[in-house]
């Protein structure tokens, strides 16, 4: 029994050692593949989008009626959920399907291939940039809506702010929970439909020809 227990312990030690070696190798590969140019670009883009959306929400929502203010917050929540769905779908989409469609010259397939090949960047932009910015803006907008509700209906501002913030957060989290399941199950369809819309404005093949 003593030898059996000892051998099991040795196996666990070797398994842990192998796991550490594998993680170190992955970390080295990731460090080598870090795209500094992309990090700088995405940081600048995030700042510009965040500034613009924050400016729009801060300047328009306090002057809007209660109904239009709520509609604007719901719009931000919807954009947040949709961007999260696309960001999740692109990481689980099958690239081979879009290569096959691209060989048959299906509209938008070339954009879909480009999206899946750059899955990390697309996911980063959709989930982190758009998603987080919409979350911040909708949170700031909910504070303005709470003030409008409090002044209009003579409610306590503190509890109104807590309630509005809780409703916005629950709608966002609940919507993302539903969206993640949908994104995993229908990833190829979501990416293709998104690629068709992007393909109206963006043509990868034409851009390559111009560069040559």
Image (cartoon, rainbow, N blue to C red):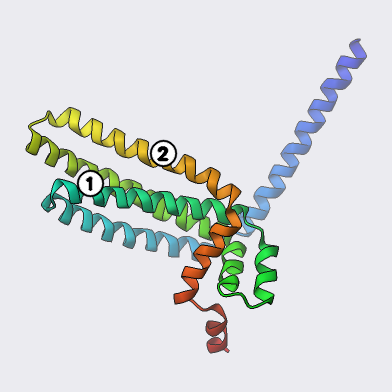
Residue under label 2, please give it: 173
* Labels 2 and 1: the sequence-earlier one: 1
Residue under label 1, please give it: 70
Picture residue at 25% right of the left edge, 50% below the top: 71
User: What is the x, y in percent for residue 56?
Assistant: 22, 58
User: What is the x, y in percent for residue 134?
Assistant: 34, 51
Left or right of residue 182, residue 64 in this image: left
The disc label shown at residue 154, or none: none
The vertical placement of 86 against 167, above or below, is below
Left or right of residue 188, residue 41 in this image: left
Rendered-image quadrant of the N terminus:
top right
Picture residue at 62% right of the left edge, 52% below the top: 92
Left or right of residue 37, residue 140 in this image: left
Q: Residues within 10 Å of mark 1 (few under 14, many from 20)?
A: some
CA gap between label 2 and label 1 equals: 17 Å
Report which quarter residue 106 is drawn in. bottom right
Q: Residues within 10 Å of mark 2 (few under 14, many from 20)?
A: some
Rendered-image quadrant of the C terminus:
bottom right
Picture residue at 69% right of the left edge, 45% below the top: 24
Left or right of residue 96, residue 68 in this image: left
The vertical placement of 186 against 160, above or below, is below
Which element carries disc 1, helix, strand or loop?
helix
| Marks 2, 1: nearer the viewer | 1
Nearer-the-camera pick, 16 or 59: 59
User: What is the x, y in percent for residue 169?
Assistant: 34, 37
The vertical placement of 154 against 199, above or below, is above
């Amino acid at each position: 029994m003593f030898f059996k227990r000892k051998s099991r312990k040795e196996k666990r030690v070797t398994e842990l050692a192998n796991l550490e070696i594998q993680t170190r190798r992955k970390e080295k590969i990731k460090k080598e593949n870090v795209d500094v140019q992309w990090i700088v670009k995405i940081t600048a883009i995030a700042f510009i989008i965040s500034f613009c959306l924050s400016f729009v929400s801060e300047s328009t929502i306090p002057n809007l009626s209660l109904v239009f203010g709520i509609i604007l917050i719901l719009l931000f929540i919807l954009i947040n959920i949709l961007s999260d769905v696309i960001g999740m779908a692109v990481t689980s989409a099958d690239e081979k399907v879009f290569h096959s469609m691209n060989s048959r010259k299906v509209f938008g397939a070339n954009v879909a291939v480009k999206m899946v090949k750059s899955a990390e960047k697309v996911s980063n932009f959709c989930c982190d940039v758009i998603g987080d910015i919409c979350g911040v803006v909708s949170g700031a907008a909910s504070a303005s809506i709470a003030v409008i509700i409090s002044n209009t209906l003579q409610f306590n501002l503190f509890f109104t702010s807590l309630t509005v913030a809780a409703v916005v957060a629950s709608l966002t989290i609940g919507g993302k929970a539903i969206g993640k399941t949908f994104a995993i199950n229908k990833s190829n369809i979501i990416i293709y439909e998104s690629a068709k819309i992007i393909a109206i404005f963006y043509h990868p093949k034409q851009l390559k020809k111009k560069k040559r």
